[in-house]
């Protein structure tokens, strides 16, 4: 490891907490230690948020339907997620990362990229920094562990941090990138989800080395121009993306004072739908994504409150903005008062060209589908001579008597 500490090519760290929600539950309730702990709601419609490593031995994993988790692990101990506690710990952890460089890009609640290129003189090389982070995280949180990947770019660091979990440290030798990547299963590539994996398996590509040897044309034919090229580059260990800290534009918002106070019902929803469209359009126009959705509510008696939610994956689409705003509205303490003003804001903005956490190549999530619709709407807005398309849900029904 020592020779790596003087290698200044190793300037990227990806740090990811181990079994995060489950580990926080164990931290707060040590009697859960060693148990097959599952975080989520065990009901018929529930999904698993995460599981302790003990529960993972039964095959339980994030995003699995709870009924399946119960079947696989009947002895599982279930706990409901406690979002605000995880946010609190997340802030502590991000604070530790910030001790070593201001160049921190949080990717979700429990992981971040760190550009440590300018920190070597202060803290020693990449390995020293990684070791210090592994000491500081348990110190500051009270005992949680983190796994770290150290590499010469984001993609390699992200893949590396996952390899020695939990409490692992993996360094990608910059002189042996190809040898390291080639034998890896294709799904280890950041962004290759089940759908892309099937496509790749379908054309006989099971390992990263196969992708590299397949040639870019085959990939473009099966995955499209941009995903095909991107995947081909990653398979060569190349990734030009830089660590992006929070954008200068702090937030984008819109608000409206109603002529007469409204209830949280139809009228408020109608406004939020339009506001979500407007905010989403500004985000798209400025090529930004938001991690945080904020709702401002003022009641008839001028009580003003704000509610906000920080999302795991940064978003841009109106559908998610609307959905979250409705959830936030339900949380507002209206005390039976009418609503005088509503505002919807998107904060914690990042560059939209940043990679998304999951499904980079897949088009399976509702959000991505919504973004496709949104792009079509945008194109219609910009094409002269055609009437701009509108979402069906925004079209006013004709008056009954007209
Ligand atoms: P991850 O870092 O993906 O998972 P993890 O920290 O639980 O486990 P690992 O040691 O493998 O990193 O996600 C961080 C948290 O985000 C996780 O604890 C729970 C939450 N989460 C969900 O709620 N749903 C999901 O589908 C995923 C992937 C994560
Ligand atoms: Mg994690």
Image (spheres, helix red, strand yellow):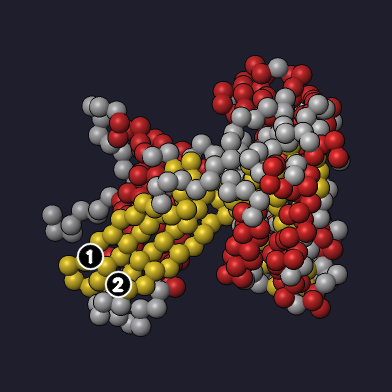
Q: Nearer the viewer, residue 29 or 212?
A: 29
**Residue 126 sits above or below residue 175 on the image:** below
The Cα atoms of the two marked residues, 2 and 1, are separated by 9 Å
Q: Is residue 98 something that shows in the picture?
A: yes
Residue 191 x, y percent position in the rendering: 65, 39
Residue 119: image quadrant is top right
Residue under pointer 1? 257
Residue 60: image quadrant is bottom right
Beta carbon of the mark 2 residue lies under 8 A of ligand 1 = no
Disc 2 crowd, CA 10 A, few/some/many (<14, 14-19, 20+): many
Would residue 164 be found to the left or right of residue 344 on screen?
A: right
Residue under pointer 2? 298
Beta carbon of the mark 1 residue lies under 8 A of ligand 1 = no
Residue 157 x, y percent position in the rendering: 72, 40
Q: Nearer the viewer, residue 343 or 382?
A: 343
Q: Which mark is residue 132?
A: none
Residue that appears at 29% across and 28% down: 383
* Badge count: 2
Most extreme residue toward the bottom, as rendered?
335
Disc 1 crowd, CA 10 A, few/some/many (<14, 14-19, 20+): some
Residue that appears at 64% across and 55% down: 99
Residue 344 x, y percent position in the rendering: 36, 59
Residue 230 x, y percent position in the rendering: 62, 27
Residue that appears at 67% across and 67% down: 40
| Whether label 2 touches label 1, CB < 8 Å | yes
Would residue 184 be found to the left or right of residue 335 on screen?
A: right
Q: Quick one: SS at disc 1?
A: strand
Assign the N terminus to one quadrant of the image. Answer: top right
Assign the C terminus to one quadrant of the image. Answer: bottom left
């Amino acid at each position: 490891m020592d020779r790596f500490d003087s290698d200044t090519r190793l300037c990227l760290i990806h740090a990811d907490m181990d079994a995060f929600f489950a580990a926080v539950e164990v931290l707060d309730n040590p009697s859960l230690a060693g148990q097959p702990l599952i975080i989520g709601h065990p009901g018929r419609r529930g999904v698993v948020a995460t599981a302790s490593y003990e529960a993972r031995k039964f095959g339980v994993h994030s995003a699995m339907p709870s009924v399946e988790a119960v079947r696989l692990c009947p002895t599982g101990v279930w706990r409901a997620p406690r979002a605000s506690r995880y946010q609190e710990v997340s802030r502590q952890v991000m604070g530790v990362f910030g001790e070593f460089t201001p160049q921190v890009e949080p990717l979700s609640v429990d992981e971040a990229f760190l550009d440590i290129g300018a920190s070597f003189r202060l803290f020693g090389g990449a390995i020293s920094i990684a070791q210090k982070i592994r000491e500081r995280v348990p110190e500051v949180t009270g005992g949680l562990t983190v796994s770290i990947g150290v590499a010469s770019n984001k993609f390699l660091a992200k893949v590396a941090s996952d390899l020695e979990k939990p409490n692992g440290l993996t360094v990608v030798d910059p002189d042996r990138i190809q040898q390291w990547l080639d034998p890896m299963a294709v799904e280890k590539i950041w962004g290759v989800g089940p759908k892309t994996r099937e496509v790749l398996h379908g054309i006989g590509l099971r390992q990263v080395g196969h992708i590299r040897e397949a040639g870019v044309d085959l990939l473009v034919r099966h995955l499209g121009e941009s995903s095909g090229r991107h995947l081909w580059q990653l398979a060569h260990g190349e990734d030009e993306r830089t660590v992006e800290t929070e954008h200068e534009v702090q937030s984008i918002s819109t608000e409206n004072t109603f002529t007469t106070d409204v209830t949280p019902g139809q009228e408020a929803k109608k406004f939020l739908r339009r506001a979500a469209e407007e905010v989403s359009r500004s985000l798209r126009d400025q090529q930004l994504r938001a991690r945080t959705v904020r709702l401002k509510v003022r009641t008839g008696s001028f009580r003003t409150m704000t509610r906000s939610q920080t999302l795991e994956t940064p978003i841009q689409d109106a559908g998610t903005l609307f959905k979250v705003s409705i959830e936030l509205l339900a949380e507002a303490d209206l005390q039976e008062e009418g609503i005088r003003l509503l505002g919807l804001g998107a904060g914690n903005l990042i560059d939209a060209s940043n990679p998304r956490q999951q499904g980079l190549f897949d088009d399976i999530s509702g959000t991505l589908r919504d973004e496709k619709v949104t792009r079509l709407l945008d194109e219609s807005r910009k094409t002269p001579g055609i009437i701009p398309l509108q979402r069906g849900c925004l079209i006013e029904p004709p008056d009954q008597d007209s």
